[in-house]
Amino acid sequence: MKIAICSDSAENQNIKQWLRELDETAMLSIFIYARPEQLLASFKQQQYYDLIFLEFYAARDFLWQLRQMDGRAAIVLLTEATRHNLLPAFEAEVTACLVRPVQKHLVQQVFGRCRNSFLQHNQELRLEVNTEDGVKEEKIFTTRDIFYVESQLRKVYIHTIDARQYQCYGRISDLEQTLRQQDFFRVHKSCLVNLHYICYIGVENIGLMYPGSGSMIHLPLSRRKREQIKEAVQLA
């Protein structure tokens, strides 16, 4: 899981330590930001997060921007008191609000719920890929990492949401069998896409939006699958 902690207080390091203590074996990448502007800037560099701890007072003007950049991240607000107007938080589908002084057991409780949800909706894939210097190595992907899968001349390319590409050998139909239950759809014989990143469905193509960057790519769409993918997007 990728976690961001955005606050200008000393509790940043406490939260980080509490998360590590809860599960030392967890594959956690934790990033700390002092200001919301820094957090937003990271999205523009193709960064994303599964869980964000965010200072509510400083975030009120940034919450909607943040949610537009990443509609799937769990957001936990850190607030001074319950007197704050929390309506924007509920409208932005915030996961939880923690009132200061932030307590260890509550941080760990919220993290536990978010981790369970993450594991439920994100499958882990271990694939052998070719590095840029031609060396084969095993790489672990989560389904959220994968933007789309493309097949070209007996080679399969994994495109990730940080705009990277990984080449592996195999058949796209094999990956389709694995990813079908994880909100992926075969839009064309050569393309398998993550439904959560579709922002446009045309007659002969679809548009996928990289989270945070605002940049979009178009991929071919089989006409006979147009109605099927519309229904699949609604259910994802």
Image: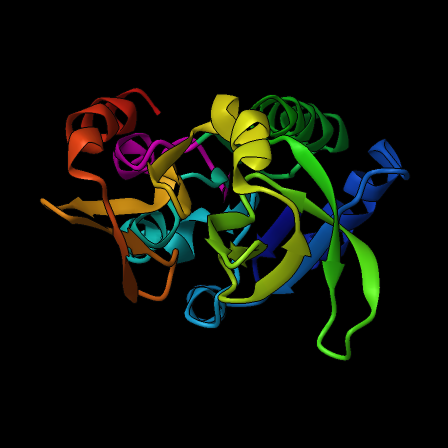
Q: Which residue is drawn at the image coordinates 35% and 54% (left, top)?
A: 69
Q: Quadrant of the C terminus?
A: top left
In this rendering, would 32 be left or right of 91? Answer: right
Q: Position of residue 203 (x, y in %)?
A: 9, 44
Q: Residue furthest front?
A: 153
Give the residues drawn in magenta, as a range.
77-94
Q: Which residue is drawn at the image coordinates 41% and 58% (left, top)?
A: 58
From what the image shows, is residue 72 above or below residue 200? Answer: above
Q: Nearer the viewer, residue 5 or 168?
A: 168
In this rendering, would 232 be left or right of 190? Answer: left
Q: Residue furthest bottom?
A: 133
Q: Residue furthest left?
A: 203
Q: Where is residue 123, by image quadrant?
A: top right
Q: Which residue is drawn at the image coordinates 90% and 39% (left, top)?
A: 24
Q: Position of residue 124 (x, y in %)?
A: 69, 35
Asked whether residue 150 is drawn in magenta, I would say no
